[in-house]
Image (cartoon, rainbow, N blue to C red):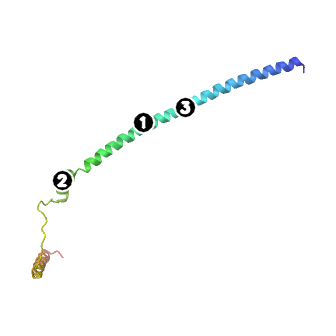
Amino acid sequence: MSKRGKNRFRQWMVRFLLLFSVVMLVSLKLWIHFQVDLLMRDIRSLEVQKNQLLSEREKINAQVKRLQNIDRIGRLAKEKLSLVNDPEPLQTIRLEDFEQLDHLKEKFAAKQSKAEKDYNLAGIK
């Protein structure tokens, strides 16, 4: 090959490499933009999902507060379970004489035997 032929080949090779580099850079830039667009779409969908979850969390917190309301609990206990809040204070029995204790035991045993007798009469065992 002559010097002129080698020179042309080098010019052609330089032009080819330059064109290939430009095409690769443009392709790389387009690929990066495509990847960024995909990530932005994912970010938007995750933000929407986050907002939905936060809204659902607020609804659940409001529902928990509503269910924890003491007035509501008292009303349900009264209506469904027939529980009554007794306003009378508890009474404490203080025995200084143990003979009174025997008297209370006998009284309690009599009440219990009467209740058992009533159950037996009703046919309940």
Distance (Cα) linking label 1 and label 3: 18 Å
Location of the C terminus by quadrant is bottom left
Q: Is label 2 in a helix, a strand or a loop?
A: helix
Q: Is residue 18 left or right of residue 35?
A: right
Measured as percent of width and height from the top left, residue 44 is found at: 46, 34
Name the residue type under label 2: Arg
Name the residue type under label 1: Val
Q: In the picture, residue 122 is in which quadrant?
A: bottom left
Q: Is residue 44 left or right of residue 74?
A: right
Residue nearer the viewer, 82 or 120: 82
Q: Are marks 1 and 3 in contact (CB under 8 Å)?
A: no
Task: Identify the residue under disc 1.
Answer: 48
Q: Is label 3 in a helix, a strand or a loop?
A: helix
Task: Identify the residue under disc 3.
Answer: 36
In percent of the image, x 64 and y 27: which residue is there? 27
Q: In the picture, residue 32 is in which quadrant?
A: top right
In percent of the image, x 21 and y 53: which residue is there? 73
In percent of the image, x 61 and y 27: which residue is there? 29
Location of the N terminus by quadrant is top right
User: Upstream in the sequence, badge 1 or badge 3?
Assistant: 3
Q: Which mark is residue 35?
A: none
